[in-house]
Amino acid sequence: MAYATFGAGCFWGVEYFFKQVDGVTDCTCGYMGGDDQYSSYSEVKAGTTGHAEVVLVEFDPNKVSYELLLDIFWSNHNPTTLNRQGEDTGSQYRSSVFFHDASQQTQAISAKRALIESSKWGDKQIVTEIVPTQKFHEAEAYHQDYLAKNNLPSCHISF
């Protein structure tokens, strides 16, 4: 198995989209990119820890490529809004690719460049950060599979 980590706003929607992908074996909501101390949801939501809400995606690279996961990431959030997705504002909702190795870094940079060159977002700047993974803090149990547990539709952002 391999791992990918993405931040694209509220982790419930991010988790939902990746769980639909054949070859994704697990998704875990959590926090990354801030201080190394354990952080609770209330601390992260308050914006005091520097963490982003992220989803750690476990996948079988024989069934799904990292490139396809990047495509899903880019397609399911707005990478032009700094520290914001829809009504969620703050650095904890920033657009982020946390790469696990040099290959992922290269692919993420190439995918971002291709998105910029596509002009899909017009003159808007792509603000997605591409940074090495840091310590992953698993979110509280009630956040895992939140949408399914609460029989809610996806919280997909319209843009």
Image (cartoon, rainbow, N blue to C red):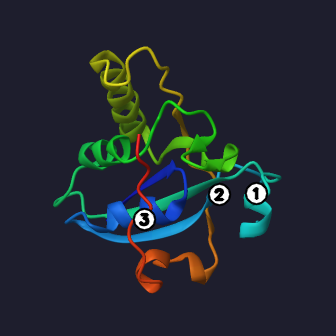
Which residue was labeled with disc 1? 36
Element at label 3? helix
- Label 3 vs label 1: CA separation? 23 Å
Residue at the image position 69 percent from the left and 43 percent from the top: 91
Identified by mark 3, the residue type is Glu
- Residues at discs 3 and 1 in contact (Cβ within 8 Å): no
Query: Would residue 18 appear left or right of 95 to someone viewing this image?
Result: left
Identified by mark 1, the residue type is Asp
Which residue was labeled with disc 2? 135
Residue at the image position 51 percent from the left and 33 percent from the top: 128
Q: Nearer the viewer, residue 45 or 64?
A: 45
* Quadrant in which residue 114 is drawn: top left
Q: How many marks?
A: 3
| Image location (x, y in percent) of residue 129 | 55, 34
- Label 2 vs label 1: CA separation? 6 Å
- Residue 15: image tag: 3
Q: Is residue 79 above or below residue 143?
A: above
* Quadrant in which residue 22 is drawn: bottom left
Mark with earlier residue (3, 1): 3
Element at label 1? loop
Mark with earlier residue (2, 1): 1
- Residues at discs 2 and 1 in contact (Cβ within 8 Å): yes
Element at label 2? loop
